[in-house]
Amino acid sequence: MARLIDSSLWVDFTRAKSPIALKSFIHPWILDPVAVLSEPIAFEVLRHATKPERVKIHQQFSTLPLLPTPTKLWRDTATLGEKCHDKGINPGSLDLVIAAIAIHHGAELITFDAGFSMIASVSALKVNVLKRPTA
């Protein structure tokens, strides 16, 4: 099964000020042979990266397979958003897009964002919410 590495891990891993212990914790997930990337995650990470960070990020991203964006992405995302809304859950739009891509490909989403657990509670999303090390 593919493991889709969420933006929350990438941001902490690529940010210069992130503690070494945190980067060391994330490193095996990024090097996992089944780690993959999606376009919305790349977008989220790159849009706030500094110029020097972007060079390294593009290099890292180029080593990972990219999950193709499904042709039904927007319909699937809308349906997922409706299911969440019906249960009183209000995730962000990009989180719904990322979840829809993971569901479509049967990929497990690896994240620090506990909000994805709520999406998983109303869908087929497979999610592994990691806890950041505390020092």
Image (cartoon, grey):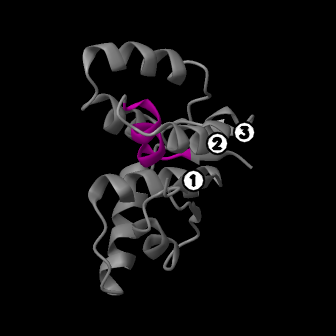
Q: Is 8 a magenta residue?
A: yes
Q: Is there CB contact under 8 Å for labels 2 and 3?
A: no
- Residue 128 is marked as none
Q: Where is mark 1, residue-wise?
A: 110
**Residue 92 image position (x, y, % from top left):** 28, 61
Q: Residue at x 47, y 57 (%)?
A: 112
Mark toward the viewer: 2 or 3: 2
Which span is picked out in magenta?
Answer: 5-15
Label 2 sits on what residue type? Trp
Q: Residues within 10 Å of mark 1 (few under 14, many from 20)?
A: many
Q: Where is mark 2, residue-wise?
A: 29
- Horizontal side of 46 relative to 72 (left or right) equals left
Report helix, strand or loop for mark 2: helix
Label 1 sits on what residue type? Ile
Is residue 85 positioned above or below 19 on the image? Answer: below
Q: Is there CB contact under 8 Å for labels 1 and 2?
A: yes
Report helix, strand or loop for mark 3: loop
Chain-order first, disc 3 or disc 1: 3
- Horizontal side of 10 relative to 78 (left or right) equals right
Alpha carbon distance from label 1 to label 2: 8 Å
- Residue 34 is marked as 3
**Residue 75 image position (x, y, % from top left):** 38, 58
